[in-house]
Every structure is written in C-alpha cells, then in structure tokens.
Amino acid sequence: MAAPRALTLLLLLGAAVAAAAGGGSAAQEQVVAVTDASFGDLSGPTLLAFTAPWCGHCKRLAPTYEAVAKELKGEGVSVGKVDCTAERALAARFGITGFPTIYFLSADGDVVQYSGQRSVESLAAFARGGWREAEALSYWSSPMGPVGRFKGFVIGSLYGARNLHTTVVERYDLSPTVAAVGLAFAGLVAIFLLALAVAWCTVGADPNAQQHAHAHAHAE
C-alpha cells in the first residue's frame, strides 16, 4: 500500500512542478522580444525595455517586468524588450547608453522615457496613462525622426559589414586583410553602380531632359 501512495504523491508533485513551470513560461511569453526587423511591426501603445544579458539590474528587473506584462494583459498595451547586444542598430536609434532603459511608445507616435521606480505598480500606471505627464522626445531626437534613423542605419551598416567580413574569412579561409580589401572594393563598385542607376533615373529616363540636352548641343 505504501508504494502506490508514494507513486501517487510523486506524480502529484511532478504535476505541480510542471504547472508552475508552465505558468512562468506563459508570463515570459507575454513579454515580446523586439528586434530591429520587427520594430516597424509594432502597433498600438508599447512599453519597451532595453536590456543586456550581462546586466545585473536587468536580471533583477526581469520578474517585475514579466509581472507588468501580466498586469497589462488585455488592456491594449504591448510589453516588449530589446536585447541591445544583438539589436545594436535599434539601440542606437533610441540612443541607449545604460541598462535597463525603458520607453513608452504611444499610439500617436510619442516616445517617452520612464524614470520612475521599477515596481509593477509604477510601471503599469505609467503605461496606463502616466506617460502623458512626462515630456516626450522631440521629433528630431526621437528614434522615428531622421537623426534616430540615421544613427540606426550607420550602426547597423557597421555591424553588418563586420559580420559579413567574419563570414567571408571563415567560409573562404581568407586572411582578415584580404577579406577587408575585397569587401572594400566590392563596396566601391556597388556605390559606383548605384550612382549610375541614380543618374539614369534622374536624367536618362527623363525624355524632357534629353530634349533639352540635345537642344543645348545644337544651339552651341
């Protein structure tokens, strides 16, 4: 009799542990991992935390942030996080210099940085409307503005070139110097071809421009 009871107790204990683990996973799934590629797909108000895996403050914030996501579930506010070690271009667009940094993105395009206490109540209240009491970033300093987009483009291009260089070195067994020279040459060729394409689109494809050019040549 003791053996069946012990087996039943073990099964119940295992089920309880599995349920607890499942609940934790569900809470984590409510926090959306945002990347540079998926950032443009965000719609509606969003609370966005910029973190780094090695950051101790970020690790301490994680359970609180997951609780915030659970608290706001069903209220039309998305809760996301960005791994700045992987999404450097997106971090550059927001001008991230410390971790964790939390922003609220409104449905109207306002971007407001959170600077309050890192508690479930404070973060949830900020997302529910408290952000209106803080000053939003100006368009020029906003990640949606030209400066933010340019910074993201530059950083993304630099890290993209570095990753491409590493891939070429490893795949074709080239020295880093040879690979760098080859990529630089390929980049110059690409710029030259792009310039030709732009020139053709602005002049060559415009019949009026061609007529003016011929008329000017005959006049001379």
Image (cartoon, grey):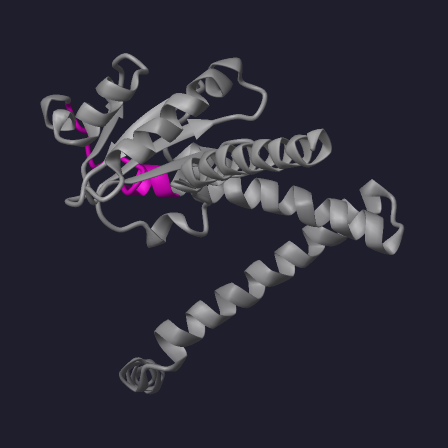
User: Can residue 141 be spotted in the picture?
Assistant: no
Which residue is found at the position 50% from the left and 32% from the top?
Answer: 84
Residue 204 versus residue 175 in the image, above or below:
below
Q: Is residue 30 left or right of residue 130?
A: right
Residue 136 colored in magenta in the image: yes
Return the x and y of residue 19 as percentages of the image width and height.
50, 37
Out of 122 and 1, give the one closest to the viewer: 1
Query: Quadrant location of residue 23?
Result: top left
Which residue is found at the position 35% from the left and 52% from the top?
Answer: 40
Query: Quadrant location of residue 117?
Result: top left
Residue 201 versus residue 92 in the image, above or below:
below
Q: Which residues are magenta?
A: 135-149
What type of secondary structure mainly makes up the magenta span? loop
Which residue is found at the position 83% from the left and 47% from the top?
Answer: 178
Total count of labels:
0
Return the x and y of residue 173 as percentages of the image width and height.
89, 51
Return the x and y of residue 127 as percentages of the image width and height.
20, 30
Residue at the front extreme, as displayed? 1
Q: Quadrant of the C terminus?
A: bottom left
Residue at the left extreme, as displayed? 133
Q: Is residue 153 left or right of residue 177?
A: left
Q: Quadrant of the N terminus?
A: top right
Which residue is found at the position 43% from the left and 70% from the top?
Answer: 199
Return the x and y of residue 161 as percentages of the image width and height.
63, 46
Out of 1 and 87, give the one closest to the viewer: 1
User: Can residue 204 be spotted in the picture?
Assistant: yes
